[in-house]
Amino acid sequence: MDDEPPTLEPTAVVPRLSAGTPGLPDGRPSGLQPAHLHSAPPPAPLLVSVGDIPGLRPRRRRGDGGEVAGADVDLIDRLPRSGPSASWPTVAAWLRAGRTAATRRARLADTAAFLRWLALASPGTGLWEVTEDMLVAYADELGTGTGAAAELTRGGRPLRAATVARRLSTLSSLYRYAVRRHVIPASPAAHVDRPEVSKAGRTPARSLEDAAALLAGAETIAPDHPADAAAVALLVTIGLRAAELEGLTVGRIGADAGHTVIQFRVKGGKEIRVPLADRVHALVRPLTVGRAAADPLLVREDGRPFDRWRQTTALRRAARAAGLDPTALTPHVLRATAATLLLGSGVPVEDVQELLGHASPVTTQRYDRGATKLDQHAAYKMADLLAPKAPARE
Protein backbone atom coordinates (compact mmCIF):
# COMPACT_ATOMS: atom_id res chain seq x y z
CA MET A 1 0.00 0.00 0.00
CA ASP A 2 1.26 3.47 -0.89
CA ASP A 3 2.17 5.83 1.94
CA GLU A 4 -0.55 8.27 2.89
CA PRO A 5 0.14 11.89 1.83
CA PRO A 6 1.13 14.24 4.66
CA THR A 7 -1.63 16.13 6.42
CA LEU A 8 -1.09 19.75 5.44
CA GLU A 9 -3.29 22.78 5.62
CA PRO A 10 -4.47 24.14 2.26
CA THR A 11 -2.50 27.12 1.10
CA ALA A 12 -3.08 29.96 -1.29
CA VAL A 13 -0.78 30.83 -4.16
CA VAL A 14 0.92 34.19 -4.60
CA PRO A 15 0.82 35.25 -8.28
CA ARG A 16 4.20 34.76 -9.93
CA LEU A 17 5.57 37.62 -12.03
CA SER A 18 8.05 37.12 -14.81
CA ALA A 19 10.89 39.52 -15.48
CA GLY A 20 9.79 42.55 -17.42
CA THR A 21 6.13 42.32 -16.44
CA PRO A 22 4.61 45.71 -17.31
CA GLY A 23 3.39 47.86 -14.40
CA LEU A 24 0.29 49.88 -13.73
CA PRO A 25 0.33 53.67 -14.13
CA ASP A 26 0.92 54.16 -10.39
CA GLY A 27 4.05 52.03 -10.53
CA ARG A 28 2.64 48.80 -9.07
CA PRO A 29 3.31 45.62 -11.07
CA SER A 30 0.28 44.60 -13.13
CA GLY A 31 0.33 41.06 -11.73
CA LEU A 32 -0.58 42.41 -8.26
CA GLN A 33 -3.75 44.30 -9.03
CA PRO A 34 -6.23 45.63 -6.47
CA ALA A 35 -8.77 43.06 -5.30
CA HIS A 36 -11.63 44.65 -7.24
CA LEU A 37 -9.70 44.15 -10.52
CA HIS A 38 -9.15 40.42 -10.01
CA SER A 39 -11.48 38.12 -11.95
CA ALA A 40 -10.92 35.51 -9.24
CA PRO A 41 -8.93 35.28 -5.99
CA PRO A 42 -5.83 33.07 -5.74
CA PRO A 43 -6.73 29.38 -5.38
CA ALA A 44 -7.16 28.14 -1.82
CA PRO A 45 -9.13 24.88 -2.06
CA LEU A 46 -10.58 23.59 1.19
CA LEU A 47 -8.84 20.25 0.80
CA VAL A 48 -5.98 18.29 2.28
CA SER A 49 -5.70 15.81 -0.61
CA VAL A 50 -7.11 15.74 -4.12
CA GLY A 51 -8.36 12.29 -3.15
CA ASP A 52 -10.98 14.09 -1.04
CA ILE A 53 -12.61 15.48 -4.19
CA PRO A 54 -15.82 13.61 -5.10
CA GLY A 55 -15.07 11.15 -7.89
CA LEU A 56 -11.33 10.97 -7.09
CA ARG A 57 -11.28 8.48 -4.23
CA PRO A 58 -7.89 6.73 -4.51
CA ARG A 59 -7.75 3.01 -5.23
CA ARG A 60 -5.15 1.37 -2.98
CA ARG A 61 -6.05 -2.27 -3.47
CA ARG A 62 -8.44 -4.32 -5.53
CA GLY A 63 -12.03 -4.10 -4.39
CA ASP A 64 -11.58 -1.18 -1.97
CA GLY A 65 -14.07 1.06 -3.79
CA GLY A 66 -11.42 3.43 -5.11
CA GLU A 67 -12.24 5.37 -8.24
CA VAL A 68 -8.80 6.46 -9.51
CA ALA A 69 -5.25 5.19 -9.28
CA GLY A 70 -3.82 5.92 -5.84
CA ALA A 71 -0.43 6.61 -7.42
CA ASP A 72 -1.95 9.46 -9.46
CA VAL A 73 -3.47 11.04 -6.35
CA ASP A 74 -0.16 10.75 -4.48
CA LEU A 75 1.77 12.30 -7.38
CA ILE A 76 -0.49 15.36 -7.42
CA ASP A 77 -0.42 15.64 -3.64
CA ARG A 78 3.38 15.82 -3.72
CA LEU A 79 3.30 19.05 -5.73
CA PRO A 80 4.60 22.14 -3.86
CA ARG A 81 1.98 23.76 -1.64
CA SER A 82 3.71 27.03 -0.79
CA GLY A 83 6.34 29.37 -2.13
CA PRO A 84 6.84 30.77 -5.63
CA SER A 85 6.62 27.32 -7.25
CA ALA A 86 3.43 26.28 -5.43
CA SER A 87 1.20 24.43 -7.86
CA TRP A 88 -0.84 22.04 -5.69
CA PRO A 89 -3.50 24.61 -4.66
CA THR A 90 -4.17 25.58 -8.28
CA VAL A 91 -4.23 22.01 -9.58
CA ALA A 92 -6.50 20.91 -6.73
CA ALA A 93 -8.91 23.80 -7.32
CA TRP A 94 -8.94 23.11 -11.06
CA LEU A 95 -9.66 19.41 -10.50
CA ARG A 96 -12.50 20.25 -8.17
CA ALA A 97 -13.93 22.70 -10.71
CA GLY A 98 -14.54 19.86 -13.16
CA ARG A 99 -18.29 19.62 -13.62
CA THR A 100 -18.53 15.84 -13.67
CA ALA A 101 -16.68 12.95 -12.06
CA ALA A 102 -15.58 11.80 -15.52
CA THR A 103 -14.01 15.20 -16.24
CA ARG A 104 -12.20 15.20 -12.90
CA ARG A 105 -10.84 11.70 -13.45
CA ALA A 106 -9.63 12.50 -16.95
CA ARG A 107 -7.92 15.67 -15.70
CA LEU A 108 -6.22 13.77 -12.89
CA ALA A 109 -4.95 10.98 -15.15
CA ASP A 110 -3.71 13.33 -17.89
CA THR A 111 -1.97 15.66 -15.43
CA ALA A 112 -0.27 12.77 -13.64
CA ALA A 113 0.90 11.39 -17.00
CA PHE A 114 2.42 14.75 -17.91
CA LEU A 115 4.16 15.09 -14.54
CA ARG A 116 5.78 11.67 -15.01
CA TRP A 117 7.01 12.69 -18.45
CA LEU A 118 8.26 16.05 -17.13
CA ALA A 119 10.24 14.36 -14.35
CA LEU A 120 12.09 12.29 -16.98
CA ALA A 121 12.44 14.89 -19.74
CA SER A 122 13.31 17.91 -17.59
CA PRO A 123 14.08 16.94 -13.98
CA GLY A 124 13.39 19.65 -11.44
CA THR A 125 11.08 21.66 -13.70
CA GLY A 126 7.87 22.76 -12.00
CA LEU A 127 4.47 23.09 -13.64
CA TRP A 128 4.74 26.89 -13.77
CA GLU A 129 8.19 26.67 -15.38
CA VAL A 130 7.00 24.61 -18.35
CA THR A 131 7.54 26.30 -21.72
CA GLU A 132 5.83 26.07 -25.06
CA ASP A 133 8.83 24.15 -26.42
CA MET A 134 8.46 21.55 -23.68
CA LEU A 135 4.80 20.99 -24.56
CA VAL A 136 5.66 20.68 -28.25
CA ALA A 137 8.29 18.06 -27.34
CA TYR A 138 5.77 16.25 -25.13
CA ALA A 139 3.23 16.01 -27.94
CA ASP A 140 5.86 14.92 -30.45
CA GLU A 141 7.24 12.18 -28.20
CA LEU A 142 3.75 10.87 -27.38
CA GLY A 143 2.88 10.71 -31.06
CA THR A 144 6.12 9.00 -32.08
CA GLY A 145 6.79 6.83 -29.04
CA THR A 146 10.26 8.31 -28.59
CA GLY A 147 12.26 10.06 -25.87
CA ALA A 148 10.94 10.06 -22.32
CA ALA A 149 7.48 9.07 -23.58
CA ALA A 150 8.88 5.72 -24.75
CA GLU A 151 9.56 4.81 -21.12
CA LEU A 152 6.01 5.59 -20.06
CA THR A 153 3.88 4.10 -22.83
CA ARG A 154 3.31 0.40 -23.24
CA GLY A 155 6.22 -0.96 -25.21
CA GLY A 156 7.09 2.53 -26.42
CA ARG A 157 4.12 2.50 -28.75
CA PRO A 158 3.00 5.86 -30.18
CA LEU A 159 -0.30 7.15 -28.85
CA ARG A 160 -3.19 7.85 -31.18
CA ALA A 161 -3.66 11.41 -32.41
CA ALA A 162 -6.94 11.68 -30.49
CA THR A 163 -5.19 10.73 -27.23
CA VAL A 164 -2.37 13.22 -27.77
CA ALA A 165 -4.90 15.94 -28.61
CA ARG A 166 -6.88 15.16 -25.46
CA ARG A 167 -3.81 15.36 -23.24
CA LEU A 168 -2.82 18.71 -24.74
CA SER A 169 -6.39 19.92 -24.26
CA THR A 170 -6.24 18.96 -20.58
CA LEU A 171 -2.97 20.84 -20.07
CA SER A 172 -4.33 23.84 -21.96
CA SER A 173 -7.31 23.86 -19.61
CA LEU A 174 -5.03 23.77 -16.55
CA TYR A 175 -2.82 26.62 -17.76
CA ARG A 176 -5.82 28.75 -18.81
CA TYR A 177 -7.20 28.26 -15.32
CA ALA A 178 -3.87 29.27 -13.78
CA VAL A 179 -3.81 32.43 -15.90
CA ARG A 180 -7.39 33.31 -14.96
CA ARG A 181 -6.57 32.87 -11.27
CA HIS A 182 -3.50 35.13 -11.67
CA VAL A 183 -1.07 32.36 -10.80
CA ILE A 184 0.96 32.72 -14.02
CA PRO A 185 1.02 35.58 -16.52
CA ALA A 186 0.54 33.52 -19.69
CA SER A 187 -0.20 29.97 -20.79
CA PRO A 188 2.61 27.98 -22.42
CA ALA A 189 -0.06 25.88 -24.16
CA ALA A 190 -1.80 28.79 -25.86
CA HIS A 191 -0.10 28.34 -29.24
CA VAL A 192 0.73 24.62 -29.21
CA ASP A 193 -0.85 22.93 -32.20
CA ARG A 194 -2.76 19.74 -31.54
CA PRO A 195 -2.55 16.81 -33.93
CA GLU A 196 -5.29 16.53 -36.49
CA VAL A 197 -7.85 13.94 -35.43
CA SER A 198 -9.63 11.79 -37.98
CA LYS A 199 -13.27 12.67 -38.56
CA ALA A 200 -14.11 8.96 -38.63
CA GLY A 201 -14.64 7.27 -35.29
CA ARG A 202 -12.40 4.30 -34.50
CA THR A 203 -14.47 2.57 -31.83
CA PRO A 204 -15.96 -0.55 -33.46
CA ALA A 205 -19.73 -0.79 -33.56
CA ARG A 206 -21.78 -3.99 -33.26
CA SER A 207 -24.40 -4.96 -35.83
CA LEU A 208 -28.13 -4.41 -35.47
CA GLU A 209 -28.55 -8.15 -34.89
CA ASP A 210 -26.00 -8.11 -32.08
CA ALA A 211 -27.63 -5.08 -30.44
CA ALA A 212 -31.05 -6.72 -30.55
CA ALA A 213 -29.60 -9.94 -29.13
CA LEU A 214 -27.94 -8.03 -26.28
CA LEU A 215 -31.25 -6.47 -25.26
CA ALA A 216 -32.85 -9.91 -25.34
CA GLY A 217 -29.92 -11.24 -23.31
CA ALA A 218 -30.52 -8.51 -20.72
CA GLU A 219 -34.11 -9.68 -20.36
CA THR A 220 -32.88 -13.25 -19.95
CA ILE A 221 -30.54 -12.42 -17.05
CA ALA A 222 -32.93 -9.97 -15.35
CA PRO A 223 -34.37 -12.41 -12.77
CA ASP A 224 -30.93 -13.26 -11.36
CA HIS A 225 -29.05 -10.06 -12.17
CA PRO A 226 -31.48 -7.12 -12.26
CA ALA A 227 -28.82 -4.39 -12.07
CA ASP A 228 -26.86 -5.98 -14.91
CA ALA A 229 -29.99 -6.21 -17.04
CA ALA A 230 -30.92 -2.57 -16.48
CA ALA A 231 -27.36 -1.42 -17.21
CA VAL A 232 -27.22 -3.32 -20.50
CA ALA A 233 -30.63 -2.03 -21.59
CA LEU A 234 -29.65 1.58 -20.92
CA LEU A 235 -26.30 1.23 -22.65
CA VAL A 236 -27.66 -0.44 -25.76
CA THR A 237 -30.72 1.78 -26.25
CA ILE A 238 -29.57 5.30 -25.34
CA GLY A 239 -25.78 5.02 -25.56
CA LEU A 240 -24.93 6.35 -22.12
CA ARG A 241 -21.31 6.99 -21.25
CA ALA A 242 -19.99 4.73 -18.48
CA ALA A 243 -19.66 7.66 -16.06
CA GLU A 244 -23.20 8.83 -16.84
CA LEU A 245 -24.59 5.39 -16.10
CA GLU A 246 -22.57 5.09 -12.89
CA GLY A 247 -23.83 8.48 -11.69
CA LEU A 248 -27.55 7.75 -12.09
CA THR A 249 -29.71 7.93 -8.98
CA VAL A 250 -33.20 6.58 -8.39
CA GLY A 251 -34.61 10.09 -8.51
CA ARG A 252 -33.40 10.48 -12.09
CA ILE A 253 -36.22 8.21 -13.28
CA GLY A 254 -39.56 9.98 -13.56
CA ALA A 255 -42.62 10.69 -15.66
CA ASP A 256 -43.37 13.55 -18.03
CA ALA A 257 -46.39 14.01 -20.33
CA GLY A 258 -47.16 10.31 -20.29
CA HIS A 259 -43.56 9.21 -20.88
CA THR A 260 -41.13 7.53 -18.54
CA VAL A 261 -37.99 9.64 -18.73
CA ILE A 262 -34.45 9.45 -17.41
CA GLN A 263 -32.46 12.59 -16.68
CA PHE A 264 -28.69 12.63 -16.50
CA ARG A 265 -25.74 14.97 -16.72
CA VAL A 266 -23.58 14.60 -19.80
CA LYS A 267 -19.96 15.50 -20.40
CA GLY A 268 -19.56 19.23 -19.83
CA GLY A 269 -22.27 19.37 -17.16
CA LYS A 270 -25.37 19.78 -19.34
CA GLU A 271 -28.54 18.04 -18.11
CA ILE A 272 -30.61 16.15 -20.67
CA ARG A 273 -33.76 14.03 -20.53
CA VAL A 274 -34.41 10.92 -22.59
CA PRO A 275 -37.61 8.85 -22.76
CA LEU A 276 -37.35 5.16 -21.92
CA ALA A 277 -39.00 2.55 -24.11
CA ASP A 278 -41.36 0.13 -22.35
CA ARG A 279 -38.89 -2.79 -22.62
CA VAL A 280 -36.17 -0.71 -21.00
CA HIS A 281 -38.43 0.69 -18.28
CA ALA A 282 -39.52 -2.83 -17.42
CA LEU A 283 -35.91 -3.67 -16.58
CA VAL A 284 -35.21 -0.41 -14.74
CA ARG A 285 -38.42 -0.22 -12.68
CA PRO A 286 -37.56 -3.00 -10.17
CA LEU A 287 -34.45 -1.04 -9.12
CA THR A 288 -36.53 1.99 -8.06
CA VAL A 289 -39.19 0.35 -5.91
CA GLY A 290 -38.95 1.29 -2.24
CA ARG A 291 -35.70 3.21 -2.61
CA ALA A 292 -34.82 6.82 -1.83
CA ALA A 293 -34.38 9.30 -4.67
CA ALA A 294 -30.75 9.93 -3.72
CA ASP A 295 -29.79 6.24 -3.81
CA PRO A 296 -27.56 5.12 -6.71
CA LEU A 297 -29.70 3.38 -9.29
CA LEU A 298 -27.03 0.76 -9.92
CA VAL A 299 -24.70 -0.72 -7.31
CA ARG A 300 -22.62 -3.84 -7.07
CA GLU A 301 -23.69 -6.70 -4.87
CA ASP A 302 -21.42 -5.43 -2.09
CA GLY A 303 -22.61 -1.83 -2.44
CA ARG A 304 -19.62 -0.51 -4.37
CA PRO A 305 -20.10 1.76 -7.42
CA PHE A 306 -21.27 0.19 -10.68
CA ASP A 307 -18.21 1.48 -12.55
CA ARG A 308 -17.17 0.82 -16.13
CA TRP A 309 -15.43 -2.42 -15.24
CA ARG A 310 -18.58 -3.73 -13.59
CA GLN A 311 -20.62 -2.49 -16.56
CA THR A 312 -18.36 -4.48 -18.88
CA THR A 313 -19.04 -7.58 -16.78
CA ALA A 314 -22.77 -6.96 -17.18
CA LEU A 315 -22.42 -6.63 -20.95
CA ARG A 316 -20.48 -9.86 -21.20
CA ARG A 317 -23.02 -11.65 -19.03
CA ALA A 318 -25.85 -10.56 -21.32
CA ALA A 319 -23.80 -11.43 -24.41
CA ARG A 320 -23.19 -14.97 -23.21
CA ALA A 321 -26.90 -15.36 -22.43
CA ALA A 322 -27.64 -14.28 -26.01
CA GLY A 323 -24.99 -16.56 -27.54
CA LEU A 324 -22.76 -13.65 -28.63
CA ASP A 325 -18.99 -13.34 -28.48
CA PRO A 326 -18.32 -10.97 -25.55
CA THR A 327 -14.76 -10.15 -26.67
CA ALA A 328 -13.99 -6.40 -26.69
CA LEU A 329 -17.54 -5.56 -25.61
CA THR A 330 -17.43 -2.35 -23.54
CA PRO A 331 -19.80 0.51 -22.68
CA HIS A 332 -18.17 2.72 -25.31
CA VAL A 333 -18.67 0.05 -27.98
CA LEU A 334 -22.39 0.13 -27.14
CA ARG A 335 -22.38 3.93 -27.39
CA ALA A 336 -20.76 3.71 -30.82
CA THR A 337 -23.27 1.02 -31.79
CA ALA A 338 -26.28 3.15 -30.83
CA ALA A 339 -24.95 6.17 -32.74
CA THR A 340 -23.95 4.18 -35.82
CA LEU A 341 -27.24 2.29 -36.06
CA LEU A 342 -29.34 5.43 -35.63
CA LEU A 343 -27.41 7.42 -38.22
CA GLY A 344 -27.37 4.45 -40.57
CA SER A 345 -31.15 4.15 -40.36
CA GLY A 346 -31.63 7.77 -41.38
CA VAL A 347 -32.23 9.45 -38.00
CA PRO A 348 -31.19 13.14 -38.36
CA VAL A 349 -27.78 13.88 -36.94
CA GLU A 350 -29.18 16.59 -34.65
CA ASP A 351 -31.51 14.04 -33.03
CA VAL A 352 -28.63 11.63 -32.42
CA GLN A 353 -26.53 14.53 -31.14
CA GLU A 354 -29.24 15.35 -28.58
CA LEU A 355 -29.48 11.73 -27.45
CA LEU A 356 -25.71 11.36 -26.99
CA GLY A 357 -25.24 14.78 -25.41
CA HIS A 358 -22.61 15.91 -27.90
CA ALA A 359 -21.74 19.60 -27.81
CA SER A 360 -21.05 19.60 -31.56
CA PRO A 361 -22.65 17.69 -34.45
CA VAL A 362 -19.14 17.10 -35.79
CA THR A 363 -18.56 14.65 -32.95
CA THR A 364 -21.79 12.84 -33.76
CA GLN A 365 -20.95 12.64 -37.45
CA ARG A 366 -17.81 10.64 -36.60
CA TYR A 367 -20.17 7.71 -36.02
CA ASP A 368 -21.79 8.04 -39.46
CA ARG A 369 -20.03 4.97 -40.82
CA GLY A 370 -22.75 2.36 -40.75
CA ALA A 371 -23.16 -0.81 -42.77
CA THR A 372 -24.90 1.03 -45.61
CA LYS A 373 -21.84 3.17 -46.28
CA LEU A 374 -19.53 0.19 -46.05
CA ASP A 375 -21.73 -1.90 -48.34
CA GLN A 376 -21.43 0.79 -51.01
CA HIS A 377 -17.75 1.54 -50.41
CA ALA A 378 -15.59 2.24 -53.47
CA ALA A 379 -13.20 -0.53 -52.38
CA TYR A 380 -15.86 -3.11 -53.19
CA LYS A 381 -16.51 -1.49 -56.55
CA MET A 382 -12.80 -1.58 -57.35
CA ALA A 383 -12.67 -5.28 -56.47
CA ASP A 384 -15.63 -5.89 -58.79
CA LEU A 385 -13.78 -4.17 -61.63
CA LEU A 386 -10.78 -6.44 -61.10
CA ALA A 387 -12.79 -9.63 -60.70
CA PRO A 388 -12.38 -12.25 -63.46
CA LYS A 389 -15.13 -11.90 -66.01
CA ALA A 390 -16.95 -14.86 -67.50
CA PRO A 391 -16.09 -15.36 -71.19
CA ALA A 392 -18.64 -13.86 -73.55
CA ARG A 393 -20.90 -16.31 -75.35
CA GLU A 394 -20.39 -16.62 -79.08
Image (cartoon, rainbow, N blue to C red):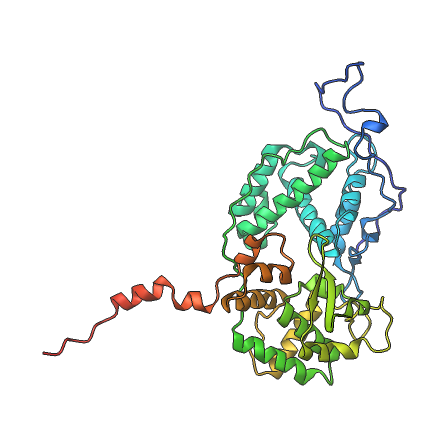
Does residue 114 sit above or below 393 in this rendering?
above
**Foreground residue among 322 and 233:** 233
Instruction: Provide residue 305's location: percent of width, then percent of height.
Output: 78, 67
Residue found farthest to the top: 26
Q: Residue shown at 72%/77% (left/top)? A: 281
Q: Residue at x 89, y 43 (%)?
A: 8
Q: Position of residue 376 (x, y in %)?
A: 38, 66
Q: Compared with residue 66, is residue 40 higher up or lower down, i.e. above or below?
A: above
Left or right: where 15 falls relative to 309: right
- How many numbered marks, from 0 up? 0
- 24 and 79: which is toward the camera: 24
Q: Residue furthest front?
A: 257
Q: Is residue 103 visible?
A: yes
Q: Can residue 307 be seen? A: no
Q: Is residue 294 above or below residue 110?
A: below
The image quarter containing residue 242 is: bottom right
Residue closest to the eye, 65 or 33 = 33
* Quarter of the image that includes the N terminus: bottom right
The answer to whether residue 198 is above or below residue 42 is below
Q: Residue 87, how many percent across, how many down? A: 77, 37
Q: Nearer the viewer, residue 73 or 201?
A: 201
Instruction: Give me the residue at 65% from left, 40% from top.
Output: 172
Residue at the spot x=77%, y=35% of the render? Answer: 181
* Quarter of the image where the C terminus is located: bottom left
